[in-house]
Image: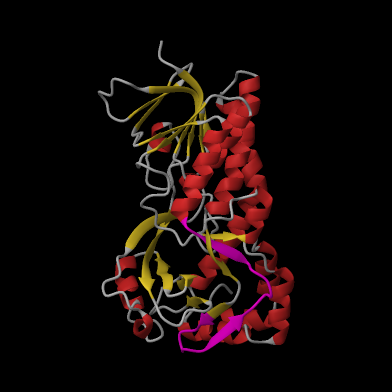
Amino acid sequence: MKELYDIAVIGAGPSGSLCSMLTARAGLSTLLLEEHEAPGQFINCTGIIGAEAFRRLELPTEPILSSLQTITFYAPSGKSFRYDPGQPLAHVVSRLQFDQTLAGWAQEAGATLRTGYHARLLRVDSDAVELRQREDDPDPIRARAVVIATGFGSNLAQQAGLAGPREIVYGAQAEVEMDNLRDVEIYLGRAVAPEAFAWVVPLQPGIARVGLVAAKEAPVHFRKLLLHPSIAPRIRTAQPKMLLSPVPTEPIERSYTDRVLVVGEAAGQVKTTTQGGIYYGMLCAAMAAETLREAAQSDNFSAEALAPYEQAWTSAISQELKMGLSLRQLFARLSDNQIDALVELGTRDDIISLVKRLAQFDWHRDLIQTSLNLPALQEVVRGGLW
């Protein structure tokens, strides 16, 4: 008889590997599927993970390439200000090494890793979920429950009867050789990254990731970014290779159904301020694993039994996501003159003190709420949200 796994996790990214590790530790037979030949291949990601995530989830530090501490913000006019919180806010990792380390931890916990398997078809039966690579696949995989951790782009959630993301943006990025790297650099303005932002993230001496987020025409804006007067003279890579990826801007309507959970970017569990998804996805993956452990104990993987997963993760991050989305909608309506004024505000001692008191790399709600009540900021953005 064909082997029946307790749990099949689709996608060996950080969320999928963490979920697999935890379900395997709980004594559930776990199969971790990865479409590429190795985890961490062909990923378009800045690799920035907040320092809190390393402490809270005990993440591997060996893949760290550099630490993010000082940030220089560039306004459309060319004005800038430098923010230094006095300690590292986050770390930049090699996603190849990071993902492979986490997948290795899942295997050490007892999960089986199967690479080169692209699950394209999903069918939920009364007693199991069946996965296939194609219609005539003679060797389907069967599991009592499935976790979809594919990142954005798969339609497996829709095959399970769940809705996909309602809105997306695009991230365009390249890794380049570059001179004069010191701080993380953030570029703002409609001519650079309309309604969003662009970045230069140092990885190691002479190497950086340069990219941006845009709602549309991301490749066009990326090519223009490479010509920016503060960037172009410093790039030594003759023809930077752009990677382009869609990213959801808000969670899917529902992340569970009979025998199926959706986690990470596939569920839209990404920061709505920056579109970073590693930490939130891993937090939610841990909640998914706990829900599956409890469901296995009662031998009940119905939608009703899996509903606590969504209750747990929405309680943890939904207010953050809503507040971040409100900020993005406000920012999208600002003119370059208003953005210049915001950057100028950032140089004020009272604003810097407020940011240092309230700012957290992965949790933005308190700072956003407090900032939006400041008369000086309200005056700057009047005509945007107000």
Whether residue 307 is visible, yes or no, is no
**294 vs 44: above or below:** above
**358 vs 130: above or below:** below
Q: Is residue 164 magenta?
A: no
Residue appearing at x 39%, y 81% in the figure: 231
In front of the other: 382 or 130: 130
Q: Which residues are magenta?
A: 73-94
Residue 173 placement (x, y as % from top left): 38, 65
Residue 188 placement (x, y as % from top left): 47, 78
**242 vs 352: above or below:** above
Residue 270 placement (x, y as % from top left): 53, 54
Residue 263 placement (x, y as % from top left): 52, 42
114 sits to left or right of 308:
left
In front of the other: 305 or 337: 305
In front of the other: 161 or 279: 279
In front of the other: 24 or 311: 24
